[in-house]
Image: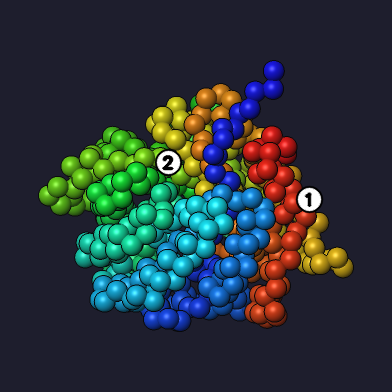
Amino acid sequence: MNKKIIPEGFLWGGAVTSFQTEGAWDEDGKGPSIVDARPIKEGQSDWKTAVDFYHRYKEDIALFKEMGFNAYRTSISWSRIFPDGEGEVNEQGLQFYDDLFDEMLANGIQPVITLYHFDLPLALAEKYNGFASRKVVDLFERYARTVFERFGEKVKYWLTFNEQNLVLMHPELWGVSLEGAENEEAMKYQVTHNAFIAHAKAVKALHELVPGGQMAGMVTYTTTYPHTPQPKDAIANLKAKELLADFYFDVFANGEYPTYITKDLERKGIMPTFEEGDAELLKQHTVDYLSISYYQSQTVSAEKVVGDNPLTGLTPNPNLKTNEWGWAIDPIGLRVCLKDMYARYRLPIFITENGIGVREELNENNSVEDDYRIDYLREHIKQMKLAMEEGVDVFGYLTWGSTDLISSGGQFEKRYGFIYVNRGETDLRDLKRYKKKSFDWYKNVIASNGEVL
Ligand code: BG6
């Protein structure tokens, strides 16, 4: 019997961010964000125009509809809504997202919205050192409440922070400079704690303001394996996994810090300051679903671990091929991750990013024969289906990119889309859109609800 694994109503589409697609960096009252202040590397693109989604979203949404998307993830730019992060609300910013979400809904596409994707209003970084300050936590709550009130009827699925597990390794993405810190590790954990509190305040606000609103905690999931069959690699792998992913999911889903973290922080004397009510807030406001981005896997070698930081043991897997940027292609790693997450938390899972970045050129037929992308996505979807067959509750799959977009490191030539955008690294050309081969492939996947791969 050919039993259908993917249920009706499954969410299919793509995912992006405001700053990697919109452009219009200073239009209609938008304030600068920390992304706009990033130094641009020689020969790389700035963020000012991106793919001009701000002005071309109707054309793009028509193409997404043609592919059959029923969901599209993007982020709201905080500094469009509050240009300096804390003063007056900018009605033009709210209006842009109102119009955008209306256009999506009119085309049968649910907006899936990230509140924060690494683009803090610059003023909050300069004035308060970003999420190092509890003041910014409160301002985040105000921003979250503002957008829930305005868009709550249009948006059901929300995410607080993109890839919140990066906060410990990259506090700068939360607008934080560690300069002058007495103890950098202690400060990083304090920022991590502040992000958890901001997250929980947003979960609380959504549940108060939006009946049926669903909030996720999100992690970028790098599946890890012991580098060898030696038991010491197994334990090194476990410790790396705890720090890479479990810590965050444990707080999102269980509402408290796990003991493997508290014991370690107490021993080092760097437990973050919990203000009155923090522990209760975390406990009472857990998430409705879990969300991941998944691109790659690694191994962990005990021999390579430096000091007591298990993440220094991360090592490439010699058995796997990589993309040009060294990201190991491992579809089975997605199944490992889904099974582990579901066994631990029993919460529905939304895959909100998966994809491959490749340098590409338009061919003479104004298309790109991106069979490698089709292969990559097909194999990952197959593994997702196997996990679902084994009982894992996955309710949506979004690829990273839909049109091409600027990569997180500021490269345009690392392309992810089904739709080629005619621009170069610094040469904007005409920004015209062209369908790649994967466009029709994904269209068939969605039309058959994942049966035809
Ligand atoms: C995720 C981020 O880490 O991966 C995105 O949420 C990013 O912002 C994506 O663009 C792909 O990574 P990169 O570095 O290839 O752009």
Q: Is residue 391 visible?
A: yes
For the C terminus, give its image quadrant: top right
Pinpoint residue 54: horizontal percent, then vertical percent: 53, 73
The answer to whether residue 85 is left or right of residue 386 is left
**In this rendering, is residue 62 above or below 330?**
below
The residue beneath circle 1 is: 371
Is 65 or 360 nearer to us in this picture?
65
Pinpoint residue 62: horizontal percent, then vertical percent: 63, 62
**Hey, which residue is sitting farthest left in the picture?**
276
- Which residue is rendered at x = 37% and y = 63% of the image? 174
**Hey, which residue is sitting farthest top in the picture?**
1
Callout 2 amino acid? Leu
Mark linked to residue 290:
2
Q: Is residue 184 visible?
A: no
- Which residue is rendered at x = 50% and y = 52% of the image? 110
**In this rendering, is residue 221 above or below 409?**
above
Callout 1 amino acid? Asp
Pinpoint residue 185: horizontal percent, then vertical percent: 32, 55
- Which residue is rendered at x = 70% and y = 49% of the image? 443
C-alpha separation, residue under disc 2 versus residue under disc 1: 30 Å
On the image, which quarter does residue 225 sit in? top right
**Hey, which residue is sitting farthest front in the picture?**
106
Crowding at dot 2, Cα within 10 Å, few <14 / some 14-19 / many 20+, comes out as many
Of helix, strand and loop, which one carries label 2?
Answer: strand
On the image, which quarter does residue 33 sit in? bottom left
**In this rendering, is residue 210 above or below 99?**
above
Of helix, strand and loop, which one carries label 1?
Answer: helix
